[in-house]
């Protein structure tokens, strides 16, 4: 099924309404086909992909369990910054 074609007749002459968020990780657009008269909703599943600040810079958060992974990440960051010494 193609998201930009009518599911009934295959026409690309679709008229979309305003996006509606369901609050359950999904949203939909009301849609009407101008060729066959189909009326329905075009659904999308939402997936979190991150944050940006007001300037468009990506904000990165790393969540780690205690232990070796934390030491490895600390050492990798220290090396990248040119820092030396014990952790």
Image: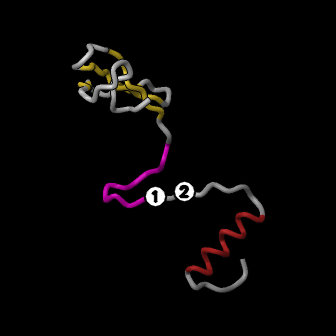
Instruction: Give coordinates of residue 62: x percent, y percent.
Output: 59, 58
Circle 2 — which element? Answer: loop
User: Which quadrant of the figure contains the C terminus?
Assistant: bottom right
Determine crowd level at label 1: few under 14, some 14-19, many 20+ residues with C-alpha closer than 10 A: few
Residue position for label 1:
59
Q: Quadrant of residue 11?
A: top left
Q: Is residue 61 above or below residue 40?
A: below
| Residue 37 located left or right of residue 70 | left
Tell me which secondary structure the magenta stretch mostly adopts: loop
- Residue 7 sits inside the magenta stretch: no
Instruction: Give coordinates of residue 86: x percent, y percent.
Output: 72, 81
Instruction: Give coordinates of residue 34: x percent, y percent.
Output: 22, 20
Q: Quadrant of residue 39?
A: top left
Q: Is residue 42 above or below residue 55?
A: above
Q: Residue at x 48, y 48 (%)?
A: 49
Q: Which residues are magenta?
A: 48-59
Q: Residue at x 61, y 78 (%)?
A: 78
Determine crowd level at label 2: few under 14, some 14-19, many 20+ residues with C-alpha closer than 10 A: few
| Residue 71 located left or right of residue 60 | right
Residue 61's mark? 2
8, 40: nearer the viewer: 8
- Tell me if label 2 and label 1 are in contact, CB under 8 Å: yes
Instruction: Give coordinates of residue 1: x percent, y percent.
Output: 44, 29
| Residue 31 located left or right of residue 49 | left
| Residue 84 located left or right of residue 37 | right
Q: Residue at x 43, y 24 (%)?
A: 22
Circle 1 — which element? Answer: strand
């Amino acid at each position: 099924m193609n998201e930009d074609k009518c599911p009934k007749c295959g026409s690309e002459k679709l008229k979309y309404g305003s996006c509606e968020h369901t609050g359950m990780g999904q949203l939909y657009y009301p849609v009407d086909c101008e060729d066959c008269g189909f009326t329905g909703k075009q659904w999308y599943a939402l997936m979190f992909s991150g944050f940006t600040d007001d300037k468009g810079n990506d904000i990165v958060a790393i969540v780690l369990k205690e232990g070796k992974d934390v030491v490895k990440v600390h050492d990798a960051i220290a090396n990248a910054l040119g820092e030396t010494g014990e952790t």
